[in-house]
Every structure is written in C-alpha cells, then in structure tokens.
Amino acid sequence: MRAHATYSSMLAPFILLASAPLGAFAADILKTSGYSTCLDNAEVTVQNLNMEFDKNTKKIVFDVAGTSQKEQKIEATLIVNAYGREVYRNKFDPCDSSTKVDRLCPVPKGSFSANGEQSIPDVVLSKIPSIAFNVPDLDSQATMQLTAKDGGKQLACITSQVSNGKSISVPGVTYVAAGMAVAALAVSGLGALAGAGQAGTPTSSPTFFEVVGWFQSMSLNGMMSANLPGVYQSWSKNFAFSTGLISWEGAQRQIDSFRNGTGGNLTEDSVEFLKKATLVHVDQGMNLTKRSFDTMQLWARDELNTNVNGTGNGTEGDNKIMHAVKGIQGYVEEYSIPKGNTFMTILLAFAIVIASITVAILLFKVILETWALFGTFPKKLTNFRKRYWWILAKTITSLVLVLYGVWTMYCVYQFKNGDSWAAKTLAGVTLGLFTAILIFFTWKIWSIAHKFKKMEGDASALFENKEVWRKYNIFYENYKKSYWWIFVPAIIYMFTRGCVIAGADGHGMVQAGGQLIVEALLLGLLLFCRPFSLKSGNWINISIQIVRVLSVVCILVFVEELGVAQTTKTVTGLVLVIMQAVLTGLLAILIAVNAIVVCCKKNPHKQKRKDAEKARDLDNLTPLDARNSLLMDPIEYKRSSVANKFGARAGYDPIPLTEQNTSYHGARPYDGQERLLADTQGVGHTRSISAERSVSPPNSRAPRLPSVDLAGPPGYAPAPAGPLHDHNYRGQAF
C-alpha cells in the first residue's frame, strides 16, 4: 500500500494527462478526490490516500495509510484512465533503489502510514499537456493495484478520481438562472398590468412557469442513476435551486433532530456524517465492487505523519469517510443535505416562501386600509383590497402548480428511502393535499366549461367572462379557447415524471426508458394540437420539449447496461451541455425582448376605448344621405338633416332653421325673441318662446297664420303639440 507513495511519482505525470473534475484548488494543481476499493476481501486495506501535484514546484505530495494482514514485499501497478481510455500504466517496486520507500519495503503487519513528497523530472513534465490543468470537469481516474512479489497474488486495488480544480458548477451560473426566473415573473406581471386585467389576454412566452419548468428538467437530469459525465453533472447542479434544494446547515441540523426523535437513523445519514465524509460518485465511471459500494468504510486522514504500528513522530488529524453515492442521493448530498432530509428540506423551503408571500400580501393590505382612512387611493387597487384572500389563495395555487412535479418526486423518494415515520406522514399528507387542490380546480374549471358549452355551444366564456378569468386563468391563460383542457395532461405529465425518477432511483435503464416515454408523449401532444394561442408560445414550448426528449436520449447513452464507450459518453455529455446552454441563452434573450415589447407597446384597453369613441363619431354619417361627407362638419350635417326631415311633409312650408332659432344638441343657443313665421304678404310677426317649447307641425297642411297678435283672432285654436315639443333635439325621428 505504501507503494502508493512510490506510485505517486508516476501518478503525477499521468494524473496530469488524465486531468479531471471536482474541487476548487489553485492554478496548475492536480489532486486526487476520494478513493474506494475495487477488490473484495483485500489483504491490504487503505485508510488514507491523498496525492497532490503542483506544476510550479514540480513536486508531488503524497499521504497514504492502511493495514496489512502480514508483512510482505509488494509490487505496485499504477493505471490512469482519461475519458474511459488507459493513458498510462507503470509497474514499480518500493524496494527498488530508484523508487524506494523505506517504510513500504516491506509492507509491515498491522497498520502503516507514510507521507512525503517527490520531485518529478522535467522529462516527465514535458509529456503533460497544459489542457490537463485548464479544461473543467474532465473524467479521469487513477487506479493502484498491489500484488505480492512472491506468487503475484493481488493484495489490494484502490481507485481515485483526479481533479484539476476547474468546474462549470459555479455560483455565477446559478445567479444568472435565478435572475432569468425573476425577470420572467416580472415581465409576466408587467404584461398583465399593460393589459389592464383584460380577460382572455395571454402572456408572451417564455413565461415564469416555462422558465422554471425548463430549469427543473436540467436539474432532474442530473439526478438520474446513470454514469453521467462529470461535466454534465456539474452543469445540472447550477439549477438545483429550481427544485427547492438550498444548502443551509442550521436547517439541516434541526431536521436531523426532528428525524432522530421520530424514528430516524443518523449514523450515516446526517449533517455531521457528511461533514466528515468525502463523496465518491460511483456513477462517474468508478469501477467499484458491490461490497465496496455497500460498505465503503475506507478512511482518509487529512494530515498524517509517518508511523508504523501506531508509533511515530507525528499526530493524527481528523478522519474522513469515503462515502459512495449515486442518483438522487449523490445530487442532494453535494449540498450537504442528507438523503433522509431531502423531503423535509423542500417542505421547509416551501413553508418559508408561503410565509413570505402571506406576510407581503397582508402588509400591503394593511397599507391600503390605512391609506383608505386618510385619503383616496387609486381605483385600480380597489380590486386587490376586496379580493386579497383570493389573491393569496391563487398565489399559493400557482406555487403548487410550479412545484408539483418535483414535489411528487421528493415525496416518492421519501416513501422509498426515508426512515422517519413523521417525515413519511408529512410527505403523504402534503402530496395528497396538493393533488386535491389541483383536482378541485380541474373539476371546477371543467364544470364551468361544461355549463357554458351547454348554454352557448362552446367554452369561450372561460376566456371572456372577467370573473371566471380572474379566478382560474393560471391554468389555461396561454392556451387556445378550444384547447383550454391541455393543463390536465400537463399536470399528469409532471406527476408521472416525478414518480418514474424517484421510483426507479438506482436503476438508470428504467429511469431513462420511462422518462423517454413520458417526454415523447408530451411532445407528440404539443405537435398534434399546438395548443398555445400565440405562435411564439407554440414554437418555444415545442423547442423546449424537443430538447427535453433529446436530453433523455443522451442520458440513455450514459446507462451502464448499454455498454457505450466512456469516450462517447463524455462527448455526448459535452454536446448535451452545449445544447441546453444554447436553449437557456435563447430563453434569456426572449425574456429581454418581451420586456422591451411590454414597456413600449400601447395599453390595449385604452386603445380599445379610443377606437370606440371614433366609432361613435362615425355613427353620425349615413350612406343614404347625399350629404354624407367626411369633409362636412358634423354639426352642420345635423342641421341640414333636421331641415330636410322637417320639410319633407307634403304641403308644409318648413320653418327656417338657423343658428338663431335652433336649440337642439350641439347648436348655438337662441336669443329668446326669434322670427318664426312670415305670411304670404311679407307681414311677419314675432313671438316669445321659452327654452322648453318649439312649434309643432300640423297633421295635414301647413297653416297660414293671419297677421294678428300673439293671442290670435277670436275662434283660433292652435294646432296640438306634436313630437317636437322638446326643442332639445338629439337626433330623434320627427
């Protein structure tokens, strides 16, 4: 085992060639990360293995410790694989003068350990490509095999991953992704405000639901139990926040206490255990035996001076446990979240978000009520003041809809791997509650649609009735009126996908095959129906679904059962990262474009009111009238129209209508003393009229009034009042 020390000299070059993932070390440094046994019932077991090569100092530092059942001379073989190919192999003897390590020649009976450093010759360094120190998340493993010098029996086998400190799992990507989700939410809100709450107005894609759903897809792909390349696993970690996974040690300790008091086993499933453990991803090409995966009790001490059988001149440091992980467990424990705490973590995150939303809405309610006591707030806020409880319920329902797929997955995972009866009970209750909420709204919308369809022949009222739209639009607002029901298969899709991923955890072939079927069915539905009301919505969602299907196909390539070469897997992983990164970038650009459009476009509600006012003005024109001209003043047209109608009766001399004797709507007021009639001899007279009466025409012929005073001659009876009794003419028929 100490051969590892000697082996380190050779390991350096070849580690460099392998250059691999993980870690965050200084520049031009390669370092092993974790280790495990690849041989059952080994006579020599390793309890510590650390090697680090610094290109600048040209030295490799090693730290190795273990136990041996007997004293014996050994030979060591060092093998380095990069991208599934063997790139280096060297066999050496710790007792040889050129590679001698005193305390490993021979390996003593009992425990042993050794640390130190060795210089790497320039001839070896010249063979190390510089790319080995720069390319992030490359797949590389170093394997050390120990054999007995007498007889050639294999005594031990240790494998370790090699890191160059470069990774694409960086906080910056997470912050950008979170910013995209917030921006999509803000643009959707601005779009709703710009539409003045008008019923039937869809939200431009990509919406908040679509963006978060896409992030969740990439995160879930990283949880698959397949031999994922390190580069893709690191990429998928950038989107873990979309599934509710947040590293928070204080919260994890509280969850540990809760589990401990409700039947949980914290021995190898707690925050304290993870703090002492080094994660070994056995789904990243690590060739481990079943026994090594199940037990994994190899130890590595951080700092250890040379000693044999417990004696030496140094002190021992803290122990580290090699902890083998894969699938969902490997994904969540990268965030120091024990697998038994997974469901409780997302439940806690959900509760915090709900509490924050509730407090914000209630605080805004208090502000409005205070405002109402001391002043008058805008009418637009009246609706919120009256309906804030419904707004709160709708917001919670929206959050349930966003998280339903991953919530299902975590609940099923808790049922399968959880140990706390209380956590399992909470998982069952919450999953049942969320499902009941979605079923209730589905039934409600379906009932309303059926009612309207029975009364009016279709379900268009779901989009046209403002009250119905305000309550239920989150489920179908972006669909065409004839495809309002598409949200039902969308919910079924989320539920089924979560069940497949969690239920088949640990079985990559079943996971990938089941998820491929689910994704393909949804893609077929979108291609057949094209249900989104906007063309952009159809193309964006279809594109997202196509990439989802292709992603699952790539993950199927990673499945161990298919035996695809590691080189092909790595190239496929890089292609998958590029494909998903390009789509994510396009979504970011579209969100920015939507923001610009929302800020620049006119308010459709205001524009509709302006169009209605113009239409009322045009209603004054009639195509049957020769005076129908857009060049004629509307007021002059009304006057001529009145005169024409009034003089159209046979045998009646029309009363001259001028600005001085006309008082219908829009005309200039009269002066009280008007000239109304003149007799045939040209003798006229005037009469005083009030602002509320006008002369009515006779029933048969126009009267010839004698030139008399206003009272008229004896025996004269004026014609009865006709329909012109109100001089405030507004266009009524005579």
Image: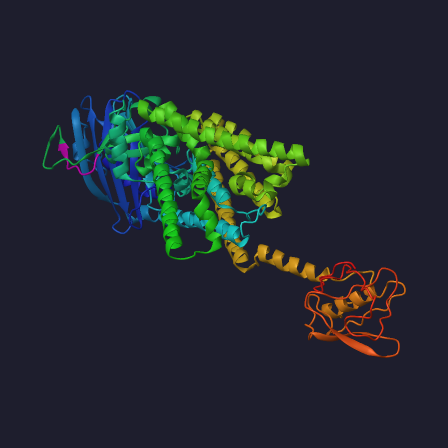
Percent position (x, y) of residue 172? 38, 50
Can you tell which quarter of the image residue 486 is in? top right
Can you tell which quarter of the image residue 487 is in? top right
- Residue 614 horizontal side relative to residue 413, left or right: right
Which image quarter is the N terminus in?
A: top left
Magenta part of the chain: 301-307
**Is residue 305 rendered magenta in the image?**
yes
- Residue 306 horizontal side relative to residue 478, left or right: left
Q: Nearer the viewer, residue 422 or 260?
A: 422
Q: Is residue 286 visible?
A: no
Can you tell which quarter of the image residue 656 is in? bottom right
Percent position (x, y) of residue 376? 43, 57
Percent position (x, y) of residue 331? 37, 35
- Residue found 82% across the figure and 70% down from its top: 713
- Residue 159 horizontal side relative to residue 313, left or right: right
The chosen color scheme is rainbow
- Residue found 33% across the figure and 32% down from its top: 344
Q: Is residue 340 visible?
A: yes
Where 299 falls versus 170 (above or below)? above
Q: Nearer the viewer, residue 50 or 238?
A: 238
In the image, farthest residue toward the right:
651
Percent position (x, y) of residue 676? 78, 73
**Is residue 425 rendered magenta in the image?**
no
What is the total number of numbered labels drawn onto the structure image? 0
Which is the main secondary structure of the residues drawn in magenta?
loop
Q: Nearer the viewer, residue 710 or 139?
A: 710
Which image quarter is the C terminus in?
A: bottom right
In the image, farthest residue toward the bottom:
682
